[in-house]
Image (cartoon, rainbow, N blue to C red):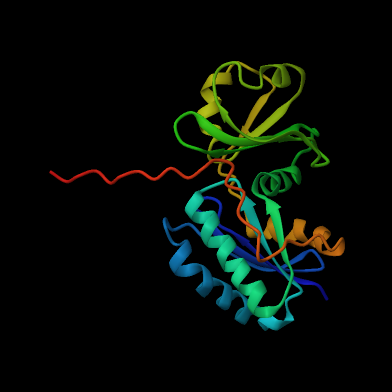
Amino acid sequence: MSLILGIETSTTVCSVALTSEGKTVATEKLFLEKSHSSLLTVVIADLLRHAGVDKQDLAAVAVAKGPGSYTGLRIGVSTAKGLTYALDKPLIAVNTLRVMAHQVNRYNVNDALLCPMIDARRMEVYTALFNDELNELDPTKALVLDEQSLAETIEQNEVLFFGNGAPKFEPLVKDKANAKFIAEVTPSAEAVAQLAFTAYQQSDFEDVAYFEPFYLKDFIATKPKKRL
């Protein structure tokens, strides 16, 4: 029995999930701002306890590697690495945008192209383009949105846009019939663990000592505003 613990902390939503042979056993999401660092390990412990699973029973730990929030990714990856190191279990990493595409593809009745978008501040998003078989047609990148973004793709294909960055793009393509928007799609640990099962079968594991999150862009620290 291949029990995989999934961890997802790429955005403000924090989630964990447990799957067996790729099928969901239990999952939990937290919609609390800045809850990752204080509650992630607690939620993992509660999830395993309620499922009647000991940590040593896990076959692997899977984590969404990014792109996404710098702080969120750092917390999720460090937690996953700590678990795999302590338990001597393999670490599996999954691209966050692929995770989102996998979630939406279950309802993709028209075999449209899938374009997840994660907010990267201002008019920039982290995005990629997938077909209905989850093959990557356009690689993960940071994209500054304007009226010409993905214009040729939208002209020739029906495209589903989703994620917390998609609302910034919707007003720019509101007259394009092929551009469809799905609200309130956040990456889930359930999808992380489901996708990780294939990687587990192929022994596609990360080197725990050297693995780092896929930040995509360098972290830029900002100084807090002075109080008057």
Q: Which of 121 and 49 is in front in this view?
A: 121
Residue shown at the point (58%, 48%) measured from the top left: 186
Tell me where residue 17 sits by quadrant: bottom right
Q: Can residue 112 be seen in this view?
A: yes
Outermost residue on the right side: it is 202
Residue shown at the point (72%, 63%) measured from the top left: 207
Q: What is the x, y in percent for residue 198?
A: 83, 58
Q: Quarter of the image containing the C terminus?
A: top left
Q: Quarter of the image containing the N terminus?
A: bottom right
Q: In this view, does 94 lie to the left or right of 173?
A: right
Q: Is residue 57 left or right of residue 183?
A: right
Tell me where residue 90 sits by quadrant: bottom right
Q: Which of 164 and 175 is in front in this view?
A: 164
Q: Nearer the viewer, residue 14 or 213?
A: 213
Residue 75, compared with residue 10, is above or below; it is below
Q: What is the x, y in percent for residue 162?
A: 61, 37
Q: What is the x, y in percent for residue 69?
A: 51, 48
Outermost residue on the front side: it is 210
Residue 20, compared with residue 74, is above or below; it is below
**Number of numbered discs present?**
0
Outermost residue on the left side: it is 228
Residue 67, compared with residue 8, is above or below; it is above
Q: What is the x, y in percent for residue 135?
A: 81, 39
Tell me where residue 93 sits by quadrant: bottom right
Q: Can residue 53 be seen in this view?
A: no
Residue shown at the point (68%, 79%) measured from the top left: 87
